[in-house]
Image (cartoon, grey):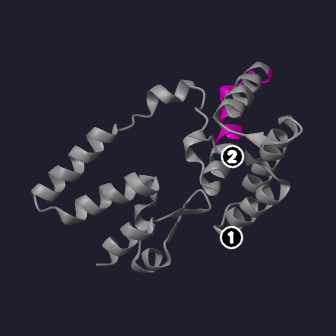
Amino acid sequence: MEECMVYLTVQQIDAFLEQMKELGRRENTLQTYRRALYELYGALSGDKRIDGAVLQSWRDRLAGQIDSPRTCNVRISAVNSLLAYSGHEEWRVQPFPTADDAASPTLTRQEYRRLLQAAKLNGKERTYLLIKLIGCSGLPLQDLPHVTAEAVRGGLVPLTAGGYSRIPALLQQELLR
């Protein structure tokens, strides 16, 4: 099977940043993303080809240059967002573990599915939809009051910290029903 070749361009970076701006990302977030993405662009070889191996090598170099895992993870987050925008989530870069990781419990996919199944079996449709909304959009619990019919119709829930959380189209339809 032939490997997909993708080349990073300044135009892709700028289009991605414009999309983030349209989604309501704060200016300081956009500046951070811009710095990180242009830093990656500068670190790429002359042809600017990217793939999983190139990105892993970039991550390894990043760890050698920056002491703070959080600082590295900010850059990794920007790159992962660009990859998602570009349709290449299979090359997502694994963030570095931080001291906060132990304090932030996460659900496995299996646990998430069990929660959904239990809510559905018990006829708890609102609970089912809330679990699905949080799982699919990453919406923080503190922002649940911002989930209004208007926000669902628009597909974006405003976040207290600024910006928006996108509601996937299929979930949006399910919530509107």
Instruction: Residue 164 in the image: state x and y as whole percent.
Output: 57, 64
Q: Main secondary structure of the magenta part?
A: helix
Rendering quarter of residue 97: top right
Residue in view at x 16 percent, y 61 percent: 124
Instruction: Residue 176 in the image: state x and y as whole percent.
Output: 33, 78
Say whether residue 47 is visible.
yes
The kind of residue on which mark 2 rests is Ala
- Residue pointed to by mark 2: 78
Q: Of label 2 and label 1, which has the lower sequence position?
A: 1
Instruction: Residue 127 in the image: state x and y as whole percent.
Output: 24, 59
**Front residue (pair 105, 169):** 169
Residue 31 sits above or below residue 52 on the image: below
Drawn side of residue 13 relative to residue 51, left or right: right
Q: Secondary structure at mark 2?
A: helix
Identify the magenta region. Answer: 65-78
Instruction: Residue 12 in the image: state x and y as whole percent.
Output: 77, 58
Specify whether residue 66 is painted magenta.
Answer: yes
- Residue pointed to by mark 1: 22
State the quadrant of the C terminus: bottom left
